[in-house]
Image (tube, rainbow, N blue to C red):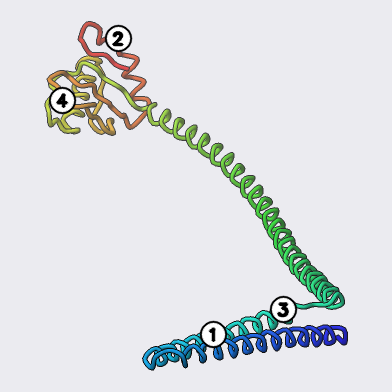
Amino acid sequence: MNKRQHSSTASEQTDTSLLDSSVFDSLKGQKSKKDSKKKKVEDDAPKQKSIKSMLSQQNAEVTTEKSIRSIETRLDEVSLKLSTVLTKDDTSVIRTIIRETIDELKDKLLSSVIKRLEIIESNVFDQSKEIDTLHIQINNKNKEIEELKTKLNKSEMHSAESLNELKQYSRRNNLRINGLQSDTEFQSSISVTEQVSSLLNTKLKLKVQKEDIDVAHRLGKFNREARPVIVKFVRRQTKADVMRNAKLLKRSGVFLN
């Protein structure tokens, strides 16, 4: 710091001496010009004397203003130079401060980044564990679904078999008759039962009462042709007797199934 103050003082003294000499020379030149102009004015006429004196005064004022401006400009230049003067020691100190500041910023930034990465890694680890747990749960659910599907398929197969057996059992007492005439559009089940009883008694020489027939009805929509008839007997033996005498219906146009 002593070197800097000494150099600054020396620079100020040098610039001040330069300014004093320039101002002195300027003022000296102005004085000589005024004396020469004064002698010329005394020899001229009164009118010329007044005009020249006015011009001389104006030139003096302009010269003074220029001198003041030049002095202010020089002072500004000197002030700017003094403000920008740095010694070698100052430069090294500033560089050291800048390096330390940069290193400190790097450490802070690196620490912040590391903490952030640790948080992200922790979150990723937690999410990974949750995902693994969800995968296990999904696999268990899939196994349960497959087991339920297997049970459902078995149940459906068993139900289908039971239904088929039930249908077969119910059909044991059923008889299909094709070619039974006297079909009408709105023929009732009672009317069909009476027709079937009459056919079996007259054609097959059996004694089948209406009470021996559980239900009898025609199949499909009426279309001017004799629709087939489904007959369900109360007892299976009645159906067996009918089928044993079915050969008596040959050439009658009536068929039993």
> Where is residue 48 shown, x and y percent of the image?
39, 88
Q: CA distance from mark 3 to mark 1?
A: 27 Å
Which tag, 2 or 3, sits closer to the chain's start?
Answer: 3
Q: Can you name the residue that lies furthest to the top here?
A: 251
**Dot label at residue 81:** 3
Q: Can you name the residue that lies furthest to the front here?
A: 43
Q: Which residue is more in the foreground, 216 or 226? A: 226
> Where is residue 103 shown, x and y percent of the image?
81, 70
Q: Is 127 placed left or right of 114 in the picture?
A: left
Q: Is 138 placed left or right of 167 in the picture?
A: right
Q: Which residue is more in the foreground, 173 or 125? A: 125
Answer whether labels 2 and 1 touch (C-beta < 8 Å). no
Q: Is residue 32 above or below residue 109?
A: below
The crowd level at tag 4 (other Cα within 10 Å; few <14, some 14-19, many 20+) is: some
Q: Is residue 24 above or below residue 160?
A: below
Which tag, 3 or 1, sits closer to the chain's start?
Answer: 1
> Where is residue 93 shown, x and y percent of the image?
84, 76
In the image, what residue type sits under mark 1?
A: Thr
Give the residue pinned by disc 1.
Answer: 63
> Where is residue 15 shown, x and y percent of the image?
74, 84
Q: Quadrant of the N terminus?
A: bottom right
Q: Quadrant of the C terminus?
A: top left
**Dot label at residue 247:** 2
Which tag, 2 or 1, sits closer to the chain's start?
Answer: 1
Give the residue pinned by disc 4.
Answer: 222
Which tag, 4 or 3, sits closer to the chain's start?
Answer: 3
Q: Which residue corresponds to the image point at 67% horizontal and 54% vertical from the top-left?
A: 131
In the image, what residue type sits under mark 3?
A: Lys
Which image quadrant is residue 107 in? bottom right
